[in-house]
Image (cartoon, rainbow, N blue to C red):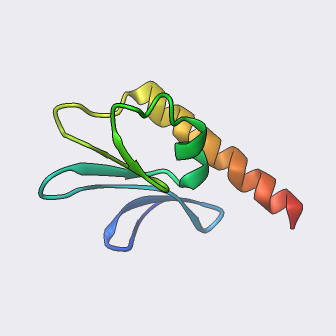
Amino acid sequence: EECIAYEIPTFRLGGRVLVSFAAWANHCAFYAGSSPVELHKDELKAYDTRKGTIRFQPDSPLSTTLVRKLVKTQIAARAAADAER
């Protein structure tokens, strides 16, 4: 589900934030969650990462393939966490 959360475009799954993205003055950012960023850190070496955030320049965007991997990883991490509850 598309929405605005924390004043930025966001996708929710099951009523909870899944991923978000934004364009700032000096960079763009994709907020994928800490698990996807950690699991795909080798593929993200070219980008500035912190916890669940990936920063990049508009002229060097994340590939569609990488975004799909990050989202699928976040969905799987969410499902695993829900299963433990």
Can you say whether 48 is above or below 43 in the image?
below
Left or right, residue 51 beside residue 29 = right
Residue placed at 48% from the left, 55% from the top? 52
Residues 14 and 46: in front is 46
Q: Is residue 70 above or below residue 4?
A: above
Percent position (x, y) of residue 67? 46, 36
Residue at 49% in and 51% down? 32
Q: Residue furthest left?
A: 25
The residue lying toward the viewer, choosing from 82 and 25, is 25
The residue at the point 79 percent across, 52 percent down is: 80
Residue 31 horizontal/vertical position (percent): 43, 54
Q: Camera-side residue: 10 or 62?
A: 62
Which image quarter: residue 56? top left
Residue furthest to the bottom in view is: 6
- Quarter of the figure with the C terminus: bottom right
**Count of numbered circles in the view:** 0
Q: Quadrant of residue 84?
A: bottom right
Position in image of residue 25 (x %, y %): 12, 58
Q: Is residue 66 above or below residue 84?
A: above
Compared across the picture, whether 50 is left or right of 14 comes to left
Relative placement, left or right, of 5 versus 22 is right
